[in-house]
Amino acid sequence: MIGRFLSGAKNRLLPPSVPFRFFTAAALFYVLFWAVLFWKAGEVAGYRLGSGPVLALIHLATLGVLTMTVIGASLQLLSVATRKAFRGVWICRLLSWVYIPGFIVLAYGMFANWYPAMLIGAGFAGLGLLIFFFLIIDNIRGVRGMAAIMAHCWASMLFLFAAVAIGILLVVNLDYGLDLDQISLASSHFILAIFGFMSLIAMGFSYILVPMFAIAPAPSEKNGRLSIACNVVAIIIALAGINSHQDWLLMVADILGMVGVGFYLYGMITVYKTRMRKRLGTPFVLIRVSWVMLPLALIWGAVGIGGYWPQNGYALFALLAIIGWLLTFLNGVLQRIIPFLGSMHGSNRGGPLLASSMADMRLFDLNAVGHLAGLVFVALGIIIDNDTVIRLGAGLGFIGGLGLFSYVVIVVGLLSRKQRESASGPL
Amino acid sequence: MPSATDSTGSPDWFSCLDRRHCERMDVRPLLAAGTDPLTQILARVDALSPGVVLQIDAPFDPVPLRRLLAGRGYASHPVRLSGDHWQVFFHQQAAPELPSLAGLPEFPLMWQDGALDMDLRGLMPPNPMVAVLRIIEGGGAGDSFTVWLDRDPVHLYPELAERHWRAEVVEQDSDGVRVRISKESET
């Protein structure tokens, strides 16, 4: 009976193979991220710039885990929110065929210092991201309402476009020696990708996903608009500061970013206080930790701009922003969204498929404990400059990553079986 | 919504009733002629002045009619006068208080035909879902109510299933979907 009522909902969702190929890839690259960190722990703390295993490691987290998750979630949920179907499932599939192999080649090229592979990989991954860019822009164009969320989508997509362009320029510069300012380019690419694209889209989706998970009224639209306005201006000022080598501009950008993040967190705290679902479970432990890490990253950034960073300050900043804020937040979101989508796609005439019946939920606890322990030990290892402690953190993170990956694989297997069963059903 | 009753088991409103002020309708001749009187009864109900009680004379206790009108907010009380003569009295109950939905933006909310009807179009997600779940958990809308939504409420379905409620799209046009949300039957 429920299946009949869900049929309308299912029609609005893309086939499960589309989002789940991105989620599976994200979970796999998440495990690989910790594995590479374990392997190359000795090169992490002092890293500042240049290709090699640490650059590959950073991109495993950003392009491999974060962007992959963002693509899967956007393709699945945005069309529901905007009431506009994407322009063809085949384009979404094409995106995966271009982006995922492109990213693998790029990451391997970075890891092995093999510039031709970096160039080819960057070309394909960049093309994939451009397909994603046009898919999203096409979907959000002319949408009524949800002004703050749409503003986040627009801004993040424009910053993505700029980040991809600069990323490709960086690879070309490495390969052909164009004599461009590599440090300014790399710093601009970092700010655009981490704070411009990924953070803004994470914050934008928070305005729907967090109240939906917690069952709470959406935060005020005004709050979201103030947040995105501050954050966009902050990123533009930061880019100006980086490229003009004016630290005071960077400090202004950091402070303005803190104000923008303050508006965002105020909205999220309001949601948290007014929620109907009292027991939010493991995903919200991760999400709440990420909300602490985001301002902490900005505060640590301000310390660095002021010239007070110790030797490994840059690595700690990258760790707070990438693992502390973004990876922790997206792990929490994945822990809620995968069971939900599994339930939506796996329902049948027998009723809805419950999250707890799909796979052992303790895999998520393992994921959360491993991730948070990994974060703490890797941070500690960077601060005291101790490779063994970093390696210990990476090992714990790896075990946690296996928990998430196992859950995703089990759900994908279950959905595949259900799909086969329904294809060869009694009728 | 159950009515208070007196010591004889009759509801209070019936015990205090002055039958001279009832509006009467005898459907026995219609039934004897093989005509279904439902349309005429509903027309009389629609034209009924506020506070006036409708008295229907019938050859049996019209339980399906009583259920139908209960859904429109009418309490009823049957009185058996003889084996083939029943008088059934219909009294419009005061509309129950509208549920409180503090913290959510304002939206049209009213009682219609004895059931709560909400227009949640234009609200930012997930406010429509929150409104529906608050109504369900508050228990102020009985076992069924309807909502107008901008979109197919995909995220609501698992939440409803978890609470043993269900949703059914009853109307759909370019302005949105009208969804009936009702409690799963015990069977």
Image: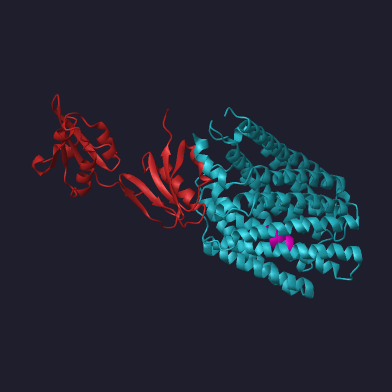
Chain colours: A cyan, B red
**Left or right placement of residue B152 versus residue A406 in this view:** left
Total numbered circles? 0
Position of the C terminus of chain A by quadrant: top right
Of all residues shown, which one is farthest toward the front? B33
Residue at screen point 58% across, 27% down: A426
Q: Residue furthest left?
A: B20
Pinpoint residue A147: horizontal percent, then vertical percent.
Answer: 55, 63
Q: Position of residue A173 (x, y in %)?
A: 87, 66
* Side of A135 where B125 appears, left or right: left
Q: On the rendered structure, is A407 left or right of B39?
A: right
- The chief SS type of the magenta part is helix
Q: Is residue B102 above or below residue B81?
A: below
Residue A27 part of the magenta segment? no
**Residue A263 visible in the picture:** no
Q: Could one spot residue B90 in this view of the protein?
A: yes
Nearer to us in this view, A40 or B22: B22
Q: Bounds of the magenta span?
A: A191-198
Q: Quadrant of residue B88?
A: top left
